[in-house]
Amino acid sequence: MTRGLRLIRDGVTAFALLALVALIAAKLNDAAKIEHMGAFHAADGDSLTLGAERLRLEGIDAPELNQSCEREGKAWACGRAAREALQGMVLASGTLCQGSRHDRYDRLLVICRSGAGGDINAAMVRQGMAISYGGYAKEEADAKAQKAGLWAGTFERPRDVRDHARQSSGFDGALHFIGRIVGWE
């Protein structure tokens, strides 16, 4: 066999192997969408439960349930307001949540749509009850411009609230443990 034919044969073989790998990878990434429809309960502004199933609205981050924000110089329970807003949206008949991936807490990451077809995740950001966590930048810009919800005052980003809570609970927990060892408590 001549050198030119071997080169062509090797090139075709390599191309066929690459095509096969690409098809396998595409099939692995083509996870089936999981759909949920029913009486959802808003655990907070970006999490739902449906029976034992826990769902996390993908692409948004809402205030923590006990988080307070400031509006017109006064504190308001923005975390509870976000939960109430989400609960109102998922009560609509025909709410459908779909997703195919889980987060590190084993919650299904979903995009929810109301019976009329509206994206509930986007609506939460547009109303200023959540911030964009990838994919809803336009809705966040609109909410900021209209000073809607969180944007009507000042607030700490939910991620920062969680980080602060983790840091303080770790330190406080360590102090409590040390106190028990040395007999302070």
Image (spheres, helix red, strand yellow):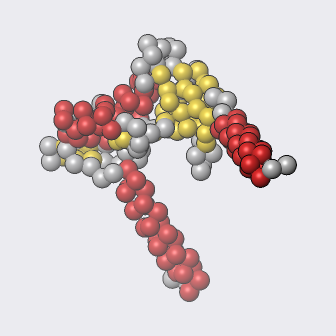
Residue 49 appears in the rendering: no
Residue 88 sits above or below residue 3 on the image = above
Residue 109 appears in the rendering: yes
Left or right: where 41 falls relative to 160: right
Identify the residue at the far left of this view.
Answer: 72
Identify the residue at the far right of this view.
Answer: 1
Q: Position of residue 56 (x, y in %)?
A: 52, 38
Nearer to us in this view, 167 or 111: 111
Left or right: where 143 falls relative to 35: left
Nearer to us in this view, 10 or 108: 10
Q: Residue at x 61, y 39 (%)?
A: 101
Left or right: where 51 falls relative to 147: right
Q: Position of residue 105 (x, y in %)?
A: 60, 49
Which quadrant of the view contains residue 65? top left
Q: Residue at x 40, y 44 (%)?
A: 133
Nearer to us in this view, 12 or 1: 1
Identify the residue at the far front of this view.
Answer: 2
Q: Residue at x 51, y 19 (%)?
A: 95
Q: Residue at x 22, y 38 (%)?
A: 144
Residue 16 sits above or below residue 179 on the image = above
How many dots with numbers?
0
Q: Position of residue 158 (x, y in %)?
A: 38, 50
Nearer to us in this view, 28 or 158: 28
